[in-house]
Image (spheres, rainbow, N blue to C red):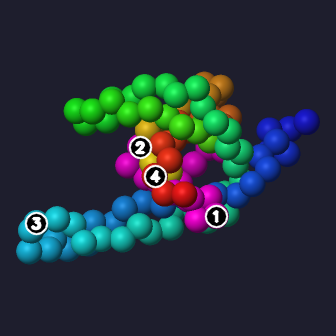
Amino acid sequence: MSFTTWLNITCNLERFNPGVLDSYNRPTGTWDSLAANAKCRIQKSKGKEFKVKSEMRLSTHTLFLQTQDVTEKDRVVISTVVYNILSVEDAAGHVHHLELELELVEA
């Protein structure tokens, strides 16, 4: 069985576009599509800890997908469920596929 046949759902990868600043100097941007309908597989994770800025966060899910241009500043949307990306790992070490540790944001 090849890796791609193991990917059983699709997800959307989104990147924040800061746009302009509002009167409080906060970005008023939007989430733009980075990759639509990317084949992937998601599973519950074991709750690994990640330091994001100055706080500790726990991963809720692990996402597997083919190599993409994706970073910890992007997010994943599956159906209407939104996840923050806490970590991006080149799992096999040979640019074979990525494993993303995710944090559930909106269900």
Q: Which mark is residue 103?
A: none
Mark 3 / mark 1, whichever is N-terminal: 3
Residue 38, quarter of picture: bottom right
Residue bearing the label numbered 3:
25
Q: Is residue 12 visible?
A: no
Give the amino acid at mark 3.
Answer: Asn
Q: Is residue 45 visible?
A: yes
Q: Are marks 3 and 4 in contact (CB under 8 Å)?
A: no
Q: Which mark is residue 72?
A: 2
Q: Which mark is residue 79?
A: 1
User: Which range of residues does the magenta coloring cover?
Assistant: 65-82
Tell me the SS state at disc 4. strand
Q: CA distance from mark 3 to mark 1?
A: 32 Å
Mark 1 / mark 4, whichever is N-terminal: 1
Q: Nearer the viewer, mark 3 or mark 4?
A: 4
Q: Nearer the viewer, mark 2 or mark 1?
A: 1
* Residue 9, percent from left and from top: 75, 54
Residue bearing the label numbered 4:
105
Is 81 situated above or below 61? below
Q: Are marks 2 and 4 in contact (CB under 8 Å)?
A: no
Give the amino acid at mark 4.
Answer: Val
Q: CA distance from mark 2 to mark 1?
A: 20 Å
Q: CA distance from mark 1 to mark 4?
A: 13 Å
Q: Is residue 98 left or right of residue 3?
A: left
Q: How busy is the neighbourhood of tag 4: few (under 14 within 10 Å), some, or many (20 plus)?
A: few
* Residue 84, percent from left and from top: 45, 48
Q: CA distance from mark 2 to mark 4?
A: 14 Å
Q: Is residue 72 magenta?
A: yes
Is 72 situated above or below 27? above
Q: Nearer the viewer, mark 2 or mark 4?
A: 4
